[in-house]
Amino acid sequence: MSGRPRIKFCHIRKQLKELGIYWVPDKDKGSHGSFVGPDQDGNIHAFTLPRSQQSEVNRDYLAALRRRFGLIGKKWANFF
C-alpha cells in the first residue's frame, strides 16, 4: 500500500449526489462504475472508477474527479 489517505466512497457518493452528480455502475464492465453529471458550465461528463476504489477512494482519484467536474471554490470547500 502506498499509505496515501483515503476517503470513504459512500461519503463521496452522497456529497456528489447533492451537487447533481450521480453514480452509475457499468453493466458491461463489472469492475468499473462512473460518476455522471454536469461541470460548472453545464456540460455533462463521466468519471470512471475501478471497483478497487469503491470502498475507499484514493486522494489522487478524488483530485481527478474534482478537476473533471470543476469542483472549485465554495462547492469544493463545502464538500467535506
Image (cartoon, helix red, strand yellow):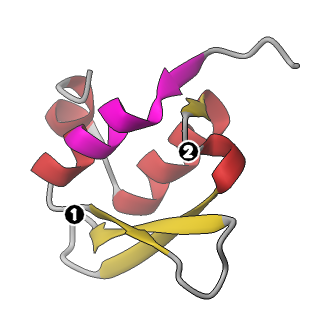
Q: Amino acid at mark 1?
A: Gln
The disc at residue 61 is none
- The answer to if 27 sits in the magenta stretch is no
Q: Which segment is the magenta one? A: 6-14
Q: Residue at x 48, y 68 (%)?
A: 34
Give, as a three-letter code, the residue at label 2: Gln
Residue 8 belongs to the span the image colors magenta? yes
Q: Residue at x 63, y 14 (%)?
A: 5
Q: Secondary structure at mark 1?
A: loop
Q: Quick check: 65 above or below 5?
A: below
Q: Using residue 18 as the reference point, say whether residue 76 is left or right of it.
A: right
Q: Position of residue 20 (x, y in %)?
A: 15, 61
Q: Secondary structure at mark 2?
A: loop
Residue furthest bottom as drawn: 28
SS majority, magenta: helix
Where is 48 relative to 76, above or below?
A: below
* Residue holding disc 2: 54
Q: Residue at x 26, y 21 (%)?
A: 80
